[in-house]
């Protein structure tokens, strides 16, 4: 899989969208950028296409016939970890948190800029292909242990499943050694966004990480950003 500035012809994206006009527009833009694109229009066909073609990234609408995008994401992520950008017609924080909880990496509300979608696709592909960093934490049986070589996280010896983006957020904060990182810094370091867009995405992922690992893993520095506060 290519994950650099210009994707190779082998980079494959599955667009799951039941509105034909939107699906066609997304597919056309992505193909013009050099990506291979498949399209599915309902939940069952999305899961079947993912299993048959194993795309490098999914762009997944929340509301689909058959079963919804959340169920698609659950079924796909249960079999393999793949980057997912979820689309929705509603700017709803609950939708965002539920989507992140079942394995989505990013979230965009319709209508959105095709240029921004492509930028997020590129950033997510770069991140999913990034080189692991050193291990954070000592004894895996005590406190929080993060192992980038296996991309596994445990709390007091019990493994906890994080999405790829949640994992990278914890890793980046941990590598900062307790230093405070602003939302813009986190967007650049974790998501690869340089324009400051998506601050709510950071907040939502922090809430999701706290829900899984404990409230004291990430501390809020009001008016500045977030810092790592290792549990135990």
Image (spheres, rainbow, N blue to C red):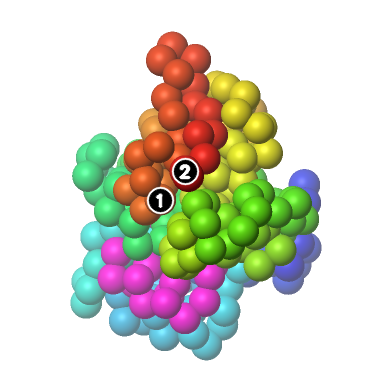
* Disc on res. 169: none
Would residue 8 be seen by someone viewing this image from the given angle? yes
Q: Position of residue 213 (x, y in %)?
A: 40, 50
Horizontal side, residue 172 vs residue 218: left or right: right
Total numbered badges shown on the rendered structure: 2
Q: Around disc 2, counting alpha carbons within 10 Å, would you say few (fewer than 14), some (14 to 19), or many (20 or more)? A: some
Question: Closest to the observer: 141 or 71?
Answer: 141
The disc, 1 or 2, on the residue closer to the chain's N-terminal end is 1
Question: Closest to the observer: 126 or 232?
Answer: 232
**Marks 2 and 1: in contact by CB < 8 Å?**
yes
1 or 2: mark nearer the eye: 2
Residue tagged 1: 213
Horizontal side, residue 41 vs residue 189: left or right: left
Quadrant for the N terminus in the image? bottom right
Residue tagged 2: 231
Q: Around disc 1, counting alpha carbons within 10 Å, would you say few (fewer than 14), some (14 to 19), or many (20 or more)? A: many
Up-down: is 101 above or below 158?
above
The answer to if 77 sits in the magenta stretch is: yes
Would residue 88 be seen by someone viewing this image from the given angle? no
**Residues in magenta?**
70-88
Question: Please, what secondary structure does the residue beneath circle 1 have?
Answer: helix
The answer to if 143 sits in the magenta stretch is: no
Q: Position of residue 104 (x, y in %)?
A: 42, 57
- Residue at 59% x, 37% y: name it: 173
- Residue at 65% x, 32% y: name it: 177
- Residue at 28% x, 71% y: name it: 71
Up-down: is 44 above or below 146?
below
Question: Please, what secondary structure does the residue beneath circle 2 have?
Answer: loop
CA–CA distance between discs 1 and 2? 8 Å
Task: Residue lying at the far top in this picture: please name it.
Answer: 223
- Residue at 44% x, 67% y: name it: 158
Question: Closest to the observer: 65 or 183?
Answer: 183
């Amino acid at each position: 899989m290519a994950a650099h500035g210009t994707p190779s012809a082998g980079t494959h994206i599955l667009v799951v969208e039941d509105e034909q006009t939107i699906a066609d527009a997304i597919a056309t833009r992505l193909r013009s950028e050099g990506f291979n694109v498949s399209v599915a229009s309902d939940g069952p066909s999305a899961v079947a296409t993912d299993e048959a073609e194993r795309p490098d990234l999914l762009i997944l609408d929340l509301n689909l016939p058959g079963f919804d995008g959340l169920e698609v994401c659950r079924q796909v992520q249960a079999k393999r970890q793949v980057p997912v950008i979820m689309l929705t017609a509603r700017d709803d924080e609950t939708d965002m948190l539920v989507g992140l909880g079942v394995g989505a990496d990013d979230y965009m509300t319709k209508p959105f800029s095709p240029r921004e979608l492509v930028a997020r696709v590129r950033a997510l592909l770069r991140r999913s292909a990034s080189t692991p960093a050193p291990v954070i934490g000592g004894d895996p049986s005590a406190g929080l242990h993060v192992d980038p070589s296996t991309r596994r996280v445990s709390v007091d010896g019990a493994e906890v499943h994080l999405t790829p983006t949640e994992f990278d957020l914890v890793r980046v904060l941990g590598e900062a050694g307790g230093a405070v990182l602003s939302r813009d810094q986190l967007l650049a370091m974790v998501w690869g966004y340089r324009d400051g867009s998506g601050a709510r995405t950071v907040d939502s992922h922090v809430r999701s990480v706290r829900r899984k690992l404990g409230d004291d893993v990430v501390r809020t520095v009001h008016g500045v950003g977030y810092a790592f506060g290792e549990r135990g």
